[in-house]
Image: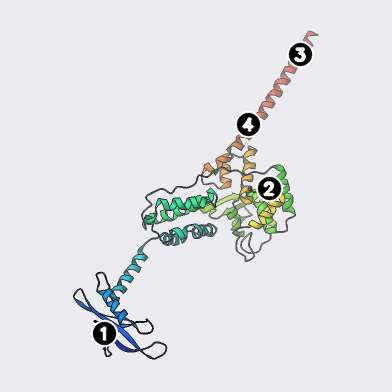
Amino acid sequence: MPAKERNRTGYKGVYWIQGIEIGTGKPERIYYIQYRKDGRLVEEKAGRQRKDAMTPARASSIRVERMKEGGLSNRDRREATKEKELEEQRKWTIGRLWAEYATTQFNEFSLSIEQSRYTNYLKSEFENKEPHDILQLDVDRIRIRLLKEKSPQTVKHILNLLDRIINYGVRKQLCAPLPFKIEKPRVNNLKTEDLSAAQLKKLMEVLDSCKDIQVRDLVRLALCTGMRRGEMFKLKWNDLDFERGFINLKDPKGGPDQIIPMNDMARTILEAHPRQGSYVFPDLRGKHYSNMNRALREIKAQVGLPKEFRMLHGLRHVYASMLASSGEVDMYVLQRLLTHKSPTMTQRYAHLRDAALKRAAGVAEDLLRGIIVEKETEKVVNLHEVNE
């Protein structure tokens, strides 16, 4: 309660005391109101004369509002606001679940991609919603809208991220699962890119004349090892075992570390490549690249490759196709070389191996036919000699 002298106004339960205006030091009236609520006397500050543009009439209106059912005093309102803030903090919204989920992702390259997907496509729609507040219609709308702008594969990646965020919260017992299954676009994942012998020859010629050593050697390494783009971008010199002839892949596509053999071509490329820090292919800051799109587009244009050909990912397919079509590499070995988690992805190359096996069977057939022809010829010759 104010210690200064109270001054009545013409309004019941409204009075003022003499105060000092903040900043100027000039006299200023500070208005207070009194009323009873739940049998107790409540006295609270209504506002300052100039700072809050407070008048006796406005103070009286505030008093009437407080006295209405549900009206709260300043103290009650502060407590209610505080409780509301605490309640908001206790909510596990998609935004809060994402922040927690992101701390568990240690693959920097993958996290940067997921951060972009969340920020650009999920944040505005779902950030402040808890999973139980999300309707199937909400997800359907965003899927339909994105499909007008993005490829089915991109939209599927975005919706998969929403799924992972919520599933993370469910596993950690932070939220309940969605009451429906998120519908995702159907994607043809069996697209296999390949290059003809003429295109490969032209690519080699363009790389030989390429002045950007980083891009040149990275493309060559992709072609002779089938490594993924992210694996090459974050490849460090201490991941290379020249003595034993292996390349250590750290967190390949979010999975456990893998080891692939370093063939002679890869060894030649890496031994001749300049060392400029811890990364094999560093950017100008000494960090690893997140993309080389501009340089790769230039190479693709010089070679004359189709617009839809994805340079680094496409060369991984070329590598796999060459091995499969040779007929000398079985599907299990190919799976290990490509570090596929399951044989399902490797099976896309099975038809190439089958074709190679058919060719091999054809060679056997030709050999057998040759032997048969030779036998028949010998019989004719022998018969001729007998008749003589």
The percent position of residue 157, horizontal first and vertical second, equals: 51, 51
Q: Quadrant of residue 94?
A: bottom left
Residue 141 is marked as: none
Residue at the extreme left of the image, as rendered: 39
Q: Which residue is mark 2?
A: 305
Q: Residues within 10 Å of mark 2 (few under 14, many from 20)?
A: some
Circle 4: residue type: Lys
Mark 1 vs mark 2: in front? 1
Residue that label 4 marks:
358
Residue 365 makes an appearance in the image: yes
Mark 4 or mark 1, earlier in chain: 1
Q: Is residue 321 above or below residue 7?
A: above
| The C terminus: image quadrant | top right
Q: Which residue is mark 3?
A: 382
Q: Are marks 4 and 3 in contact (CB under 8 Å)?
A: no
Instruction: Determine the residue positioned at 64% across, 45% down.
Output: 318
- Pointers 3 and 2 in contact (CB under 8 A)? no
What SS does tag 3 mark? helix
Counting residues from the start of the chain, the first of labels 4 and 2 encountered is 2
State the residue at coordinates (60%, 64%). 287
Q: CA distance from mark 3 to mark 2?
A: 60 Å
The one of 33 and 255 positioned closer to us in this rendering: 33
Give the spatial CA distance, label 4 vs label 3. Answer: 36 Å
Label 4 close to label 2 by CB (< 8 Å): no
Q: Which residue is mark 1?
A: 10
The three-letter amino acid code for the residue at tag 1 is Gly
Q: Residue at x 77, y 9 (%)?
A: 386
Label 1 Cα neighbours within 10 Å, binned few <14 / some 14-19 / many ≥20: few
